[in-house]
Amino acid sequence: MNRKLAIGLALLCFAVLFIPGLFAPEHLAPPDLDLRYAGPGEVFPFGADASGRPLLEYALQGASVVALPALLAGLVVAFMGVVGGLLACTGSSKAEAAVQAFGEIVGALPRMVVVLVVALLVPKEARSLLPIALTWGLLAAPGAMDEAAAVAGRLGGARFVEALRAHGFSRARIFLFHIIGLNLRPVVVRQGVETMMQVVFLEIGLSYLAVQDTQPSFTHGDSEKSWADLLYLGYQVFLDVETGHALALGLGLVGVVALSSVFVTIAVRSR
């Protein structure tokens, strides 16, 4: 795929996913039983739920739940990847040992167990996806650091830096442009975007379990709805309930999340 087309499609996906969250209502509209399970033709543009409330509000609130935490988790992973790649270019045995120790300790932790512990420690009145997302990002960082260090190692590490220094390039140009901009960029951006996607899917999974068991969610307050609510409502179509429009909306949002990761990976690939 053409790089410019991939960039445009990636920006479009992110706009569809995250910008609507800025306009999410604090509370859902009052129920209107006359519009129960109404389709998109009656309640534009996505139809209504079992109480006649617009599914658009579900989509908006779900976007507000995941947007900022997923973005911050992705930035954490990308930053840690950059750190791992730059430390591999210093030629310091102590730095390599520190990165290896960090990776072994954090990488050995069971992610889901740690995430659930963090979720349980957050007070009920302050439930949010943010601490869960940052924890997931920290646990995913060793993989990004290892891959970035491998890329730096293939460049030649400290020898690559010294060779460019011998040609008169400044350290800022070497590290910021040649190492990060040209060589680490595909790795750290892809790792960051994949982490964002994982956080979104993690939120959907946790919220779906909570909805299924009629329990409060770990990721958002009781007044908010997640994209998991759309899927839970939509899957009732297999029980002969007219919720196919909700299932289509939920799966469509999940598909856009996955496609955004694909398009970003293509857009930042090495030349």
Image (spheres, rainbow, N blue to C red):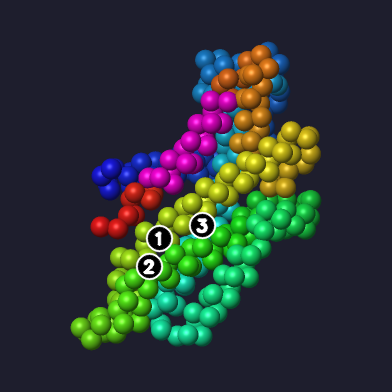
Q: Residues within 10 Å of mark 2 (few under 14, many from 20)?
A: some
Callout in the foreground (3, 1): 1
Residue 189 x %, y %: 42, 58
Height in image: 96 above or below 60?
Answer: below
In front: 190, or 147?
147
Tell whether label 2 touches label 1 (CB within 8 Å). yes
Q: Residues within 10 Å of mark 1 (few under 14, many from 20)?
A: many
Amino acid type, label 3: Gly
Residue 76 x %, y %: 53, 63
Q: What mark, if any, has residue 44 been given in the picture? A: none
Task: Tell me the quarter of the image containing the C terminus.
Answer: bottom left
Is 66 situated left or right of 168 in this image? Answer: right
Residue where numbered disc 3 is placed: 74
Quadrant of residue 64 in the image?
top right
Residue at 30% of width from left, 79% of height from top? Answer: 160
- Say which element carries label 2: helix
Q: What mark, if any, has residue 151 been given in the picture? A: 2
Q: What span is in magenta?
A: 247-263
Height in image: 53 above or below 72?
Answer: above
- Say which element carries label 1: helix
Is 224 situated left or right of 166 in this image? Answer: right
Residue 169 x %, y %: 24, 81
Callout in the foreground (2, 3): 2
The CA span between labels 2 and 3 is 19 Å
Residue at 23% of width from left, 86% of height from top? Answer: 166
